[in-house]
Image: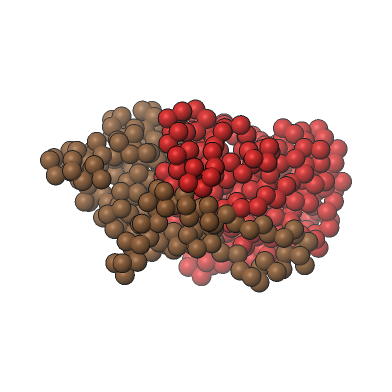
Amino acid sequence: MTSYAIFLGCTIPARQPNYELSARKALAKLGIELIDLANMTCCAPPPIQSINLEASLAIAAYNICLAEEADLNLITLCTGCFESLSIANTMLKADKQLKAKINRILSQAGKEFLGSKEVKHYLQVVTDDVGLERLKQNVSKPLTNLKVAAFYGCHALRPSELLKFDDPERPQIFESLIETLGAKNVEYRNKLKCCGGLLRGYSDDLALNMAREKLVNTTKAGADCIATLCPFCFVALDIGQMQVKLKFNEIYDMPVLHYSELLALALGIDPEELALKTHKIKVDKVLNKII
Amino acid sequence: MEYGKEEKTTNLAFSKVVTSRLGGETISLCYQCGTCASSCPVAKITERFNPREVIKLSLLGEKNEVISGDAIWLCCSCYNCQERCPQKVEIADVIYALRNIALEEGYIPNIYSEFASALLNDGRIVKVSKFVENKRSVLGLPPLQPTGVDALRKILSATGFDKLQQKEEESE
């Protein structure tokens, strides 16, 4: 069994039990043990980087220190957390001066960043540690006939030089994982374009325009649902659909599921255990197609 | 801060200020080709934001226009521009550096001061309510571990992040 320290971040424990439940249950079934460490904090994503970049690097490094002390690699569910922590980890490992500077800050909190651990998104863990072959063997309820529009969001892929997740213009990891569950991957226009999630709260109008484009394009492509990796993208597209309805008077009724939810369902986990009622757009259409 | 001194001598010094900051190091590599603007999903739908323009104004020393304006807050942090820049200008990071300067000078959009307060108070930018926390066991989730908010405050204090908060509270 491979063990990781799980980094939950802020949005998932606060708003998305559906993400956390499906990920915990699915990963356990695949032989990945998740350890909950005390004293973690926010990862310092772009909104905090916008306030103070140096503090943000130090906050990310502090959280990596906790994993180093526990002698565990980190696994994230949220791609925002993946990005903040990975960038800090990669930058500080590569730049001794920056590392020394950040360590002077961390010493105030009694920590020292060593650079001895890795940060992984759970898609990488499923691909690398479990492997597509073994994943396929574990699928007991294949998602046959389900047409899924993969939405990577931004922060798994970019900046690719630091994240090294997949090819930033032609990624494949997510599509492969969808097809391994027996579902059909659906291509759609402007697939890699941002959902506008981080503009919510500052410019809701622009954010909604961007989310709407995703709904238009995935609907045109005939998708049964959108699969997400990030709690912010989920909010932009799920709750966002209610707001699109109010603003544009358009109803898409496009279910949005985290990949972990599709994974859990394909592994035969009872939908009743997955808090699917958290979704604003009902997922019944998806369940009816696969059960 | 050093950049305050430089600014008094010449406007062009603003680009040096940006270059000297974490995130801003690559700004002067820009040759204004516009790959960023044509890759930007926000610029596609509004004239209020154009990354090439933000960089141009910064390089020309138009500090006030850049840091007091709305544009720098309209970057959606998608990194498309940064990914495609032929000059390897780290455009999204440059925007963070510009936002950092804007905040130090008192330009703080409401949503960002909310993020900052939440971080200082709870160690998270989205608060986990008692109701949600209590519901975890019913749903079959393990108890939520405590956040390291005390350590976090020490880090924020060592970087001047908490001073920004105080400044904002004074001005209210």
* The N terminus of chain A sits in image quarter: top right
Q: Quadrant of residue A115?
A: top right
Q: Is residue A159 above or below residue A269?
A: above
Image location (x, y in percent) of residue A91: 49, 33
Residue A145 in sight: no
Residue B158 in sight: yes
For image coordinates 71% across by 41% down, the residue present is A4
Image location (x, y in percent) of residue B147: 60, 56
Horizontal relation, residue B144 to residue B32: left or right: right
Q: Say which of A185 and B100 sits in front.
A: B100
- Which chain wears brown? B
Q: Say which of B78 and B97 sits in front.
A: B97
For image coordinates 42% across by 30% down, the residue present is A97
For image coordinates 52% across by 66% down, the residue present is A243
Q: Quadrant of residue B97?
A: top left
Image location (x, y in percent) of residue A83: 54, 42
Image location (x, y in percent) of residue B31: 28, 30
For image coordinates 45% across by 62% down, the residue present is B117
- Which chain wears red? A
Total numbered circles: 0
Horizontal relation, residue A48 to residue A192: left or right: left
Q: Is residue A168 above or below residue A188?
A: above
- Its colouring scheme is by chain
Q: Say which of B148 and A81 sits in front.
A: B148
